[in-house]
Amino acid sequence: MKASKITHLLTFNPDDFIPVPNITIVHPQDFINCQ
């Protein structure tokens, strides 16, 4: 799969993803809490 300019990934299951350089994995509640 090719993708470009992806910087953030919004997901309910952040633990399902491995850490990827330059991509921030965010749970929706984290986004709400920072507002």
Image (tube, grey):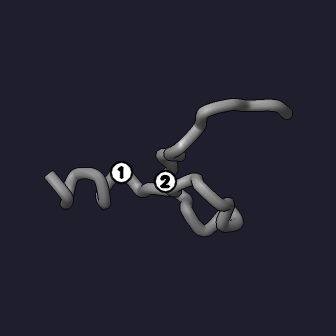
The tag on residue 4 is none
Nearest to the observer: residue 3 or residue 33: 3
Nearest to the observer: residue 31 or residue 3: 3
Q: Dividing the picture into quarters, in which one does residue 13 lie? A: bottom right
Q: Dividing the picture into quarters, in which one does residue 4 lie? A: top right
Residue type at tag 1: Pro
On screen, residue 9 versus residue 31, left or right, reads right
Give the CA separation, mark 2 to mark 1: 7 Å
Q: Label 2, secondary structure: give it.
A: loop
Residue at image coords 22%, 52%: 32
Residue, disc 2:
12
Q: Tell me: residue 19, above or below residue 31.
A: below
Q: Tell me: residue 8, above or below residue 24.
A: above
> Residue 23's spot in the image, x, y percent?
57, 53
Q: Within 10 Å of the Cα at label 1, are there few (<14), some (14-19), or many (20+) other Cα atoms?
A: few
Q: Give yes or no for contact between labels 2 and 1 (Cβ–Cβ under 8 Å).
A: yes
Residue at image coords 50%, 45%: 8
Residue at image coords 44%, 56%: 26
> Residue 7's spot in the image, x, y percent?
53, 43
Residue at image coords 31%, 60%: 30
Q: Label 1, secondary structure: give it.
A: helix
Nearest to the observer: residue 13 or residue 34: 34
Residue type at tag 2: Phe
On screen, residue 17 versus residue 34, left or right, reads right
User: Quarter holding the N terminus?
Assistant: top right
Question: In the image as oriented, which residue stretches furthest toward the left?
Answer: 35
Residue, disc 1:
28
Nearest to the observer: residue 15 or residue 34: 34
